[in-house]
Image (cartoon, grey):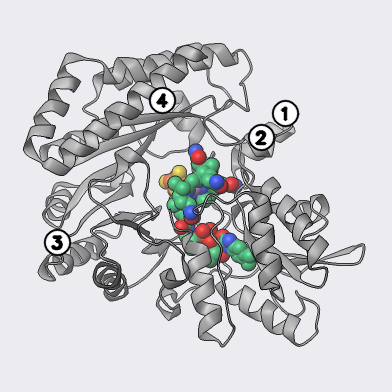
Amino acid sequence: MPPLGVLYMAANIRKHGFSVSLIDAEGARLAQEEITARICELAPKILGITATTLSIHKAGALAEAVKQCLPETCIVAGGPHATALPMETLKQFKAIDAVIIGEGEHSILQLAQNVMAGRGPGEDIDGVAWRVGENLFHSPCQGFLQDLDSLPMPAWDLLEGFPKDYRPPFHSYRRLPVANIITSRGCPGACTFCDRSVSGRKVRYHSVDYVLKMIEHLATVYGIREFSIKDDMFITPKSRVLDFCRELKRRNLDITWSCNARVNSVNEELLRTMKDAGCWMISYGIESGSEQMLKKMMKGVTKEQIVKALTMSREHGIVSKGFFMIGIPGETEQSMRDTLDFLKSIPLDEMNVNFFTPFPGSKLYEEVIAEGHRPDFPSMSMQSITYVPKGLNAPLMKKYQKEMIISFYVTPPKILLYLKRALTDVHECKRLWRSFKLFVNMQLCFNKD
Ligand code: B12
Ligand code: SF4
């Protein structure tokens, strides 16, 4: 999927007169030697690299390789990992000259102005950590961007192969081409496993007008037919979502879309209007069927609210997807069994269960570090077990994961539901066929393990 944060930053720097090139190494599936060769050929004055915790080692290795051929280039890292652990990132990866902490649109511009003027990269800019020789410096935190509409639209035109070479996971789209968009930033939730260091707890919104311009632009210039709305908090405030849906429908753009929501933020009117405006799937972060684990995660939702949201979604013909997580500190065999039982009892259409992964920036990261856990960043993908709670073991956690998946999907009512859905819509039929193939592959992997 296109790296939106980078596209926003590129658009903003370009607007201010800088020339920008963009390489989506992951999207283009480039090996590190190929990325390095391309960068060395471009010979930029500043190289920005984005990274999550999973990819920070690759970012560090890339910085190292580029430094060999371009010793004068200022190498800047940003994104969730560098934001959560700025000083550690500089200490660990010596080829990285500076780290931008938080949202990068303004800071990278100011940093570029500093570098072009021969000043230190972080001088007089909030939210930067940088090195001068052996010394590390850290400026005060920057605030969050308030006026999101003042940002130019993401620079999709700089993205080689967009949209044809981009697509989300097989089961999460109905039509192609798909684009991911963000209509707001921040989430007031307090979930203890979640890293919100970049966008914080206060939600800031693009106006409905901005969002529709973005959608219209993507639909007309790139032929986008489906949108995956990636906001943490898309569904509130309700009046904004209702306005968005009505205006989207009025413009008659022939598009479909999906989004994320919290179970306690949907209601009948919202779901009806969303469905009417082309929404076909909502992903809910359900996480657990154990009241105790839900409390520990500080999800702020009850099992009753989960059931109610799923029941309403089904009644309105919107596919519901649930994300589950096993293995947070305090998880026991009993709590995993509770989740398994809960999963069997709820009117949920699709699900995914990952292993808890202690990401820097989350509350539980602090807790497990205090317990003595040493994280292994390159393996922190949520699909492998990197943390095992006291009293559990990895094979048992895997056994429950497998059982949850099989007992959820392989039941006559579920199969009947999918067959019925497949018959009503050709796009849904193709999606379910892709999902089925994925499911079979997953089973083969499980059996290999
Ligand atoms: C969409 C999404 C995805 C998509 C697409 C990612 C993409 N290409 O952008 C997919 C599904 C592929 C994905 C995958 C994963 N994701 Co994800 N994803 C998101 C999500 C929901 C939105 C990202 C987004 O568009 N944000 C909006 C833009 C504007 O913000 P941004 O990308 O952070 O960029 C800003 C700043 O970070 C900064 N910045 C970023 N890069 C740089 C670089 C420089 C040089 C500078 C100066 C600044 C800078 O400036 C940007 C503009 O303000 C975020 C949650 C969130 N709300 O951000 C999680 C999130 C980024 N994902 C997360 C995780 C854990 C994963 C996975 C590990 C999940 C998995 N099971 O596989 C993988 C890792 C993929 C990888 N290889 O690294 C975590 C990261 C936590 C961490 N500490 O690493 C997040 C924060 C969710 C969370 N709260 O836990 N993800
Ligand atoms: S998991 Fe979702 S609801 Fe919870 S804090 Fe993170 S973004 Fe918000």
The residue where tag 2 is placed is 367
Tell me the residue at 56%/36% (across/down): 381
Q: Amino acid at mark 1?
A: Glu
The x and y percentages for residue 263 are: 30, 41
Whether 175 is drawn above or below 330: the answer is below
Q: Which mark is residue 291?
A: 4
Tell me the residue at 13%/33% (across/down): 422
Report whether residue 329 is seen: yes
Residues under numbered marks 1 and 2 in contact, where contact means CB atoms less than 8 Å apart? yes
Neighbour class for label 1 at 10 Å: few (<14), some, many (≥20)?
few
As measured in the structure, the alpha-carbon distance from the residue carrying label 1 to the one carrying label 2 is 6 Å
Q: Which mark is residue 371?
A: 1
Marks 3, 4: nearer the viewer: 3
Residues under numbered marks 3 and 4 in contact, where contact means CB atoms less than 8 Å apart? no
Name the N-terminal-most of marks 3 and 2: 3
Task: For mark 2, give the secondary structure.
Answer: helix
Label 1 near ligand 1 (CB < 8 Å): no
Q: Is residue 342 left or right of residue 373?
A: left
Task: For mark 1, give the secondary structure.
Answer: loop
As measured in the structure, the alpha-carbon distance from the residue carrying label 2 to the one carrying label 4 is 20 Å
